[in-house]
Amino acid sequence: MRTCVELRGSISVAHNPSFSPKWARIHGHDYVITVGICRDGYTDVVVDAAEVSEKFRKVLTSMDGRYLASPFEKLPPDIKDVYIVPCSLSGVSGECLARHIAELMRASWVRICESGFGSPCFYYES
């Protein structure tokens, strides 16, 4: 059994997943992101909710409205507002973004869902 606190937020970003033949172009997504911070067993307080909420807000604000790029990606010269996500691919995937946010938040798991009916979600559990 675990006790968890979930935080939910959203960002609008652009990326160019050159690893995907179908989507290999610059395009954007609105992501709904849920972060779970869990402790084993039952506990009355998992984390300081105010503190972790502020940290999550800062993480999302640092990405919102930006182009997400991997450190290996060659950026077009006209792209200025960039957030680097440590992915090993040429471009940022939802899976890699979920892992990155989990590491920044020290979260037990992260789920990132593209907006829209039938859109995929990406899940990372640490």
Image: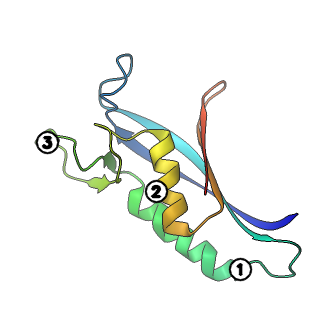
The answer to whether any part of residue 34 appears in the image is no
* Relative vertical location of residue 20 with respect to residue 58 in this rendering, above or below: above
Q: Residue furthest top?
A: 22
* Relative vertical location of residue 75 with respect to residue 11 in this rendering, above or below: above
Which residue is denoted by mark 3 in the rendering? 78
Which amino acid, mark 3?
Answer: Asp
Residue 93 coordinates in the image, percent (x, y): 43, 38
Which of the two discs, 2 and 3, sits closer to the camera? 2
Mark number for residue 22?
Answer: none
The tag earlier along the polypeptide, 2 or 3, is 3
Tell me if 115 is positioned left or right of 61 in this view: right
Question: Looking at the image, which residue is at 45% across and 46% down?
Answer: 96
Which amino acid, mark 1?
Answer: Val
Question: Of helix, strand and loop, which one carries label 1?
Answer: loop
The tag earlier along the polypeptide, 2 or 1, is 1
The tag earlier along the polypeptide, 3 or 1, is 1
Location of the N terminus by quadrant is bottom right
* Circles 2 and 3: CB atoms closer than 8 Å: no
* Relative vertical location of residue 49 with respect to residue 15 in this rendering, above or below: below
Question: Of helix, strand and loop, which one carries label 3?
Answer: loop
CA neighbours of label 3 inside 10 A, class few (<14), some (14 to 19), many (20+): few
- Label 3 to label 1: alpha-carbon separation: 42 Å
Tell me if 124 is positioned left or right of 100 in this view: right
Which residue is denoted by mark 1 in the rendering? 47
Residue 10 coordinates in the image, percent (x, y): 56, 52
Which residue is denoted by mark 2 in the rendering? 100
Which amino acid, mark 2?
Answer: His
The answer to whether any part of residue 74 appears in the image is yes
